[in-house]
Image (spheres, rainbow, N blue to C red):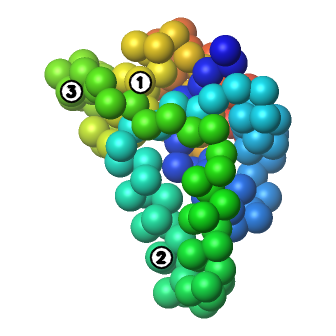
Amino acid sequence: MNLFVLDASIALAWLLNEEAGSQADRAWLRLKDGDALVPRLWHFEVRNGLLVAMRRGRIARDASAQLLRALERFPIRTDVEPDLETAFDLADRHRLTIYDAAYLEAALRNAAPLATLDKALAQAAAECGLSLVGGRIGT
C-alpha cells in the first residue's frame, strides 16, 4: 500500500483550487495509487478552511457542501490510534502546535511520508528523517 499522511493544507489547496506547487500535485497523484492517513482533527481543519473561504466570499455555501461530499470519496483513513504523549513531545521539541505534531506523530508511527504545505511541519518532518511528498517546500 502507498500510505502517506495528509495535512489539511494540501486538502484545502485541492478543494479550493489553489496554486500549491509540486507538493499538492504529487500528493494528488499519490492518492490515486494509495491511501492517505489523517488525524481526527483533519476533518475539523478542512471544514474550518472551507468555512473561512465561504465567509470571505471565495466559495458559496452550496459549493462547500459539494466539496465535502467529493472529499468523502477520496481514499482517506482516519487515524484512531494516536500516541498523545509522543505528539506532545514532538510539539515541544520542534516548536510546533500540538495539532501539527499530530500529523508528524502519525507519519512517524506509520513510517509514512508526509504531505504538507506548512514550512515548520515540513522542517520538523525532515529533522525526524521523514520524506515529504513532493519534496522540500518551495521546490
Q: Amino acid at mark 3?
A: Leu
Look at mark 1 in the image and give the residue it sits on: 106
Label 3 vs 1, first from the N-terminus: 3
Label 3 vs 2, first from the N-terminus: 2
Visible in this render: residue 132? yes
Q: State left or right for residue 9 relative to residue 28.
A: left
Q: CA distance from mark 3 to mark 2?
A: 27 Å
| Residue visible at 72% across and 35% down in the picture | 31
Q: Are marks 3 and 2 in contact (CB under 8 Å)?
A: no
Q: CA distance from mark 3 to mark 1?
A: 10 Å
Look at mark 2 in the image and give the residue it sits on: 51
Q: Answer with the quarter of the image where residue 137 lies.
A: top right
Report helix, strand or loop for mark 2.
Answer: helix
Q: CA distance from mark 1 to mark 2?
A: 26 Å
Q: Amino acid at mark 1?
A: Ala
| Residue visible at 57% across and 75% down in the picture | 65
Visible in this render: residue 94? no
Dot 1: within a 10 Å radius of its alpha carbon, few (fewer than 14), some, or many (20 or more) residues? many
Residue 17 place in picture, x, y as percent? 76, 64
Look at mark 3 in the image and give the residue it sits on: 84
Dot 2: within a 10 Å radius of its alpha carbon, few (fewer than 14), some, or many (20 or more) residues? some
Which quadrant: the N terminus? top right
